[in-house]
Amino acid sequence: ELRKQGIFVSAGGVRSIWLRHHLANFKQRLIALEKLVAEQGIILSETQVQALERKKEDEIACGEIETVHPGYLGSQDTFYVGNLKGVGRIYQQTFIDTYSKVAFAKLYTM
């Protein structure tokens, strides 16, 4: 709509405005939308209603874990990969940092 009025905004400009108003990711924008509906009682479009319903379903199903910084909390798993002749059983141990989503994997023999 701004382009129709002759106003051009760069992607970086939009991003900096989102950051200034704490709207950098989709989750933050949905929270702001819920707050706006509660305060002003605006009427939402069908796609906005669907997005809010999906968010509520995700919160119920997943229960996202809040972490403060990298290394604060991790998820770890070990599973059997297979068997190699002359080597033996091989297991993979995986660690995922829940804040940064960085994963590490290591193979072990037994």
Image (cartoon, grey):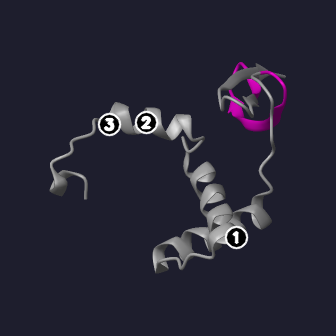
Counting from the top left corner in percent of width and height, residue 39 is at 68, 67
Q: CA distance from mark 1 to mark 3?
A: 30 Å
SS state under label 3: helix
Tell which circle, 1 or 2, labels the residue nearer the N-terminal end.
Answer: 2
Left or right, 24 with respect to 56, comes to: left
Q: Which residues are magenta?
A: 71-93
Is label 1 or label 3 in front? 1
Q: Amino acid at mark 3?
A: Ala
What is the number of the mark on residue 38? 1
Q: 10 Å neighbourhood of mark 2: few (<14), some, or many (≥20)?
A: few
Label 1 or label 3, whichever comes before in sequence order: 3
Q: Secondary structure at mark 2?
A: helix
Query: Is label 3 in contact with label 2 (beta carbons under 8 Å)?
Result: yes
Callout 1: SS? helix
Q: Residue at x 81, y 45 (%)?
A: 65
Q: Is residue 49 above or below residue 39?
A: below
What's the residue type where badge 1 is placed? Ala
In the image shown, does 49 or 71 lie closer to the viewer?
Answer: 49
Q: Write the residue at 62% across / 49% down.
A: 28
Residue bearing the label numbered 2: 15
To which residue does mark 3 refer?
11
